[in-house]
Structures are given as structure tokens and as C-alpha cells.
Amino acid sequence: MRHRRITRHYAWSPDESRRAVKEGGSSCSCRSCPGLELGRPSHRKRAFGVQEAKTLLARSWLQLSIMDNCEMYENTSKCIASSKSMECFMVLSTQAQKISTATLCGLFGTLCIFENCLVLYLIFSSSGTRRKPSYIFISSLALADLLASIIFVGSFVNFHVFNETDSSKELFLLKLGGVNTSFTASLSSLLLTALDRYISISRPSKYKLLVTRKRAWTALGVLWLGCVANAFLPLMGWNCCTLNSACSELFPFVDNNYLFTWICLVLILLGCIVCAYSHVLWRAHQHVANMEMYTSQVHVGKQNARMRMDIMLAKTLVMVLTVLVLCWLPALILMIYSIFVSLNNHLRKVFAFCCTLCLINSMVNPIIYALRSKELYSSLRMHLSRCRRQLRTSNDSPEAESAHRSSMIETICEDIHAM
């Protein structure tokens, strides 16, 4: 009861509560429960109990003030890009969470940059691959994933780990537009790759007439322009500050209607990708079934090879769809949930983790779409063997080179004498 009576006498501001936490943490030396200390008859121990009660009240006030920052941001300072208005979006509270997040983002981001740079080099270093439309689409995917890894990791770590805010609302929306552009372009490039494979298996005789280099570059131009225009709509005025509408609980300054529109766009892209690859798998299975019906016993080896190809294609497509669903669906579900229901601090932390799954998707895409290709794999092996030969020649000693030259001179002299 004394603990309750004490709590009624203290109503602090956030600055006073922070000061009380520091004073309570420095002066309190007892390790037992503060409620039990308040029940002891000793005056000294009762003083320690009062001090610990102040500390507990201050800590609880800090937690409540942090949770209420979103409401304050919604009502009073939603258009001010300051540390106080951004506090509720910085969900990583402990040092361990910040260190683990920075480590994961640094590791995944470095691997993603290396893989996509390697894919772009392998495609454009060979004249045969850079002219094919399918590899043009894969290069667009690699470029989008490369930009996503650079912009996302830099912005995410800077905001959630170092808790640094931008100087203005426009600068924050510019960075958010860059992340939005790269991830949307990545999914759109996946859709073009899926449509390319769908046309190649549904109309193989007309594939070269339908899918040309000019049409491929035109489709990529329309794709990137559409992604840029859609991503920078909040910067051009579709935000909750300009419209004085409801702001998102996950992204500062973002209007809920815009977030819902972007979610619908991403779901449409994912649905089209799933439909295209499902149709590719069905046509491949149908083709193998027809070959089983019309081939004779003499061609059993070829039939088994086609069946193995069907199984490999099925495994690849299942891998593609599994990665897409696992990496994108959790974040999209939480985005949809945030539009209709208020999120607590725990769900915001879960959403921050789910955002890193989209980075994992950008890291896995080069392995699935590019490095599994026979042409790119053979090109990679050729470049690696060339690098090994250069290392061997550079590591040769001068004595070995002089011995090789002397042996060559001796053989030339012997040939002259023989003549």
C-alpha cells in the first residue's frame, strides 16, 4: 500500500524522469525487491525503498512516454523531421539488438553487393550474353538488387542503429523513394524474367520474333520509369503532411492510402510472378507427358533426360516461389495490419526484422537466376582460370625465368649446329 501511495505523489516530466533514473541508479545499492524494502520498519531501508520506487516510476514513465510519442507525432509534430518526432520509429532499444542488426545488414549487404556486381560483370563482359533478352532482364534484376542493398543498408542502419535523423522531411522521403524504387524494380524485373520464360516455353517457335533486344530495352525503360514515378509520389505531395491525413505507423510522413496502394502493387506483381511460373511448370510437365506418350523404347535415355530436366525445372521454380513468399509476405502482412490496427513496440521490432528479409531476397536472386545459368557459370569458370594463370605467372621466380630462357637458347643453338 505504501508503494501505491508513493506513486500518487510523483508526476514527472520526461526530463525529470530521466534525471530520477540516473539518481536512482547511482544511489540505490540494495538488490532486493523494492516492494519488500518498503515494508521493512527501518527508516534507512524505507528511504532506499522510496528511492527505488522513484526509479521504477521514472522508468515506467519513460516507457509510456516513448509509446505515446506516436500519438504526439500524429497530432502535433508529424511534419517535423526531428529526433523527438522520430523516436517512436526507432524501435531497436537495446545495444545487443543494434549490434546484431548492424552485423546482419553489413554481412548480407556486402554479399549482395559482391554477387550482383559479379553478375553484371559476367553479363556485360561477354558479347553473347549481353545481347540476349533474357540476360538483359537478369542484368536489370542485378542492378535493382545492387541499388537496394546499398540504399537500404545505409538508410536502415543509419536510422535504427545510429538513431540519426535527416535534416528535412524531403530528404527522408528522397531516401525512402530510393529504397522503394530499387525493391519495386527488383520485383518488376522478376516479373519480366518470368514472362520471358513463359513465352519461351509456351511459344518456342515465335520466341525470337516476340522477344527482341529492342522490345526488352523498351520494357525495361517503361519498368524503371514507372517504378521511379510510383516511389517518389510521397516526395511530390502524396504524404500525410501535405494532405493532412492519417500517417503510417511504420514509415514517417507516409500516407496510409499511399502505403495501401503500394502494397496492392507489390501483391499484383507477386501474383503475376506466381501465375507465370506455375504456368511454366505446368507446360513443362505437359511437354514431358507428351514425350512419354510418343517416344519409343529406343529413346528411353532421351526420355529420362527430359524427365530429369522437368524435375530440375520444378525444383528451381519451387525455390523461386518459396524465396519470394518467405521474404516478402511477412513484411506485407504487417504493413496491411498497421493500416487497420495500431501496432505495439514489439510488432514494430518484428517489422524491422522482416525488412531485412527483403534484403536476403536480393542476396539470393543472383544465385537462383544468374549463377545457375550454364553460360554464366562457364564464363565465371573461364575468368577464374584466367586469374589463376595470371597468379601463377606473377608468382614465378626470376631464376626460373632465366633458366627457361637459357634452355631455350641451348635448344636454338643445338638446332643451328644440327643444320
Image (spheres, grey):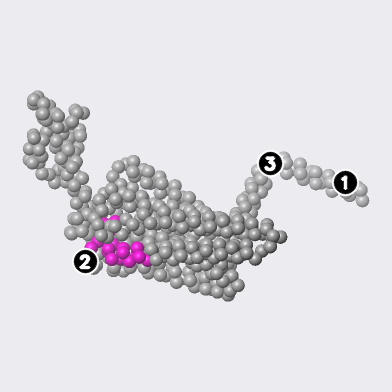
- The residue under label 2 is 244
- Mark 2 or mark 1: name the one nearer the start of the chain: 2
21 sits to left or right of 230: left
What's under tag 2, amino acid-wise? Asn
- At horizontal 59% and vertical 62% (from top left) the residue drawn is 288
Q: Is residue 73 visible?
A: yes
Instruction: Say which quadrant the N terminus sits in.
Output: top left
How far separated are the C-alphas under marks 1 and 3? Answer: 26 Å
- At horizontal 40% and vertical 45% (from top left) the residue drawn is 103
In contact (CB < 8 Å): disc 2 and disc 1: no
> Which residue in the rendered view is the most extreme toward the top?
42
- Mark 1 or mark 3: name the one nearer the start of the chain: 3
How far separated are the C-alphas under marks 2 and 3? Answer: 74 Å
- The residue under label 1 is 414
- Mark 2 or mark 3: name the one nearer the start of the chain: 2
Q: Is residue 189 visible?
A: no
What range is drawn magenta here?
Answer: 245-265
What kind of element bears circle 2?
loop
What's under tag 1, amino acid-wise? Glu
Q: Residue 411 versus residue 110: which sits nearer the camera?
A: 110
369 sits to left or right of 378: left
- Residue 180 lies in quadrant: bottom left
- The residue under label 3 is 397
